[in-house]
Each structure stands twice: as structure tokens, then as C-alpha cells.
Amino acid sequence: MRAIAGSLGVVGYVSQSYGNGSITYVENSYAVKSGVATANLLNASGAFVAPTAAAVGIALQGSAAGPEGVFANPDPRAYPLSSYSSMFVPNEVTANFTTQKGRSLGQFARFALCEGQALAENYGYAPLPINLVTEGLDQIHSIPGAESVDVTCDSPSPNSIDLSVSTIPAGDSLLSIEFSTDEPAKLGTAELVNGVSVVTGTLPEITVHDGRVASKQGWDVSANLTPFINKADASQTIGTRHVGLRPFVIRSTAIRAAPAVAQLAGTAVYPAQFASGSGAGVTVLGGEVTLVSPVDSPAGTYAAKLTLTITSQ
């Protein structure tokens, strides 16, 4: 871990070759200007969201509930690490703060909350959502000298375009799992590892289609395995506990898709959870198989069947 002073210093460090692989936190505006990569963060709904102006604005709509309402905003479009800056304004006249200054400050605050919001995204910031704009405008008349400032604000983004659309009802399709039954798992050649026969390989791609939009979403895929049977002598078998299975997600358009914890050869238990997901979309899964033969198992060719079953959550 390295401490770097200031946002410019942080961005300068991670953008250099000696900072390759560094992970840091900095205002999005500095990341945008310097061209460094940003990370999608997991929000309260289970979606990974990029720090776009729209995603920040959606998160800030939960600010009425305090910081937790922003960080834990349940909207799947919300960027969880969102925040905003506050301006503290005087509410009484002092020797250094006159009503003339108060009027100028009120006019500036109104511009910042109204027309100025249209400029925010150009500098790597997000326009404030209407709830925060309204709260800010409500405070302007408390500034001495700003009582007559017009606090009406047509829109945080004044150069807006009215949109009108007609929608149609959401349409559900089926939940299904697909893979080629003609394509066997690609298992390699046995090798001796610490004196024990070990074979590794991969499963063909497994595709989950979840087209349920209006109805309940979410699915689980489980894996069940038969013992490996020697093709020359069916009395010789290798139990399923000796077969490891490591599932993984190749790609997904669902809100969430995650592999289950791997089953380890020697302690594996079947049936076992393979993967789970939520939200309509297509998820492509894969898996790595490892067979560690018991020392007393005779050499030979063995075969087994892996069954994958999908269920709705």
C-alpha cells in the first residue's frame, strides 16, 4: 500500500508504467481527464455499475435517507459510491458579510443549481437529481440579501428535449438450459502427480436462457454425477468423491450470474450446486473437471455421466 498526496498525485501515479495494476479511489472527473480505467462496482441490487453521470444521479435520488440511502440504493442502475458536495451559506449579516454579498451569493447558488447543472457532465461530474436541486433552492432565501432572488428552475438541465413514447406490455419467455449432448467433455491424458493418476478437462459451453421479465426471476443450476465405470470391467468403479468440478461464468447479460464453490477431488459431494443467476438474459457457463484416481484403482478407460438441472428460484 502506498500513500499519495492529492487527487492529481494519485492519478499521476496510477497512470504511469510503475503504477500498472494499482487500484485507488479518486474523483471520477480526474479519472476522465487522465484517461485511466474505472471499475464497475457491485450495488445493493447485485448489479455491477459503471460511474456514469446517469448512474450517479439515480443513486443520489436516495439521499433523503442519508448516506445509506445512496450507498444502498436498491435501484439496479445506481452507482453505489456516489456523493455530492454541500455549500454552507450564512444566514445573518456580519461585518464581513453584507446583504449585497448575500444577493450575489444567492444568484450564484441559483445558477449553480439550475443552468450550471448542464455543464457538470463536461467536467466529469454528475448533474444533481431534482430532489437535491429542490432542497438547495429552498435554502437560497435564507441568505441575507437573497430574499428576492428568483428560485424557480425549469430543469437542472435547461437545454432539455421533451420525449414521448408508447410502451407495450413486457413479454415473458421460457427459462431453459442448453448444451450439446453430442459433444463430450474434453478430458486430457492422464498424468502422474505425486504418484497418483490425475486427469483434467473442460465441459462444453452450457447456455442458460432466462426470458422471464414480468414473472419471478432467478435460477439455480445443479450438477449430479454417476461413478466412473471401467469400460473393460464394470465391477471396477471410481466414486464421485474423487471427481473435482470447478464451474465458471464465461459471459452473461443477466443482472447477476455466479458460479458455485468448486467441488474438490477427494472430498467432492454430489449432487452439488453449479451456478446461480438472476435477471433476464443469457448466461454461458463452463466447467473444469479433475479426476484423481484412488491408488488401488486399476488402469483403464472409465466413463461417467454428468447431469445438469436448472430450477427456478
Image (cartoon, rainbow, N blue to C red):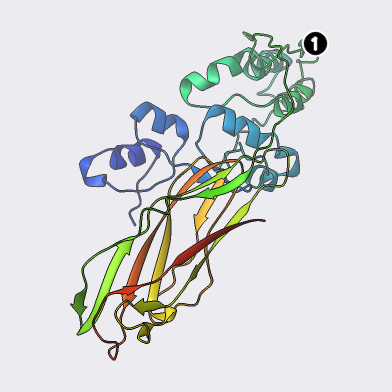
The one of 156 and 179 positioned closer to us in this rendering = 179
Above or below 123: residue 38: below
Name the side, left or right, on which 294 lies relative to 169: left
Question: What residue is at 79 percent from the left and 24 percent from the top?
Answer: 138
Picture coordinates of residue 282 (x, y %)?
A: 52, 42
Amino acid found under the numbered disc labelled 1:
Ser
* Residue at image coords 37%, 48%: 23
The image quadrant that residue 33 belongs to is top left
Q: Position of residue 85 (x, y in %)?
A: 60, 33
Left or right: 207 in relation to 288: right
- Displayed quadrant of residue 211: top right
Give the residue displayed 50% in from the left and 36% down from the top: 50
111 and 105: which is toward the camera: 111
Q: Is residue 233 left or right of residue 254?
A: left
Residue at numbered disc 1: 148
Give the farthest residue toward the bottom: 296
Coordinates of residue 14 in the picture (x, y in percent): 30, 42
Could you say where residue 248 lies in the image, as x and y percent from the top left?
A: 42, 56
Q: Secondary structure at mark 1?
A: loop
Q: In the displayed structure, would residue 21 be above or below residue 270?
A: above
Examine the rendered structure and indicate whether residue 242 appears above or below residue 133.
Answer: below
Placement of the N terminus among the 4 image quadrants: bottom left
- Quadrant containing the C terminus in the rendered view: bottom right
* Closer to us: 253 or 211: 211
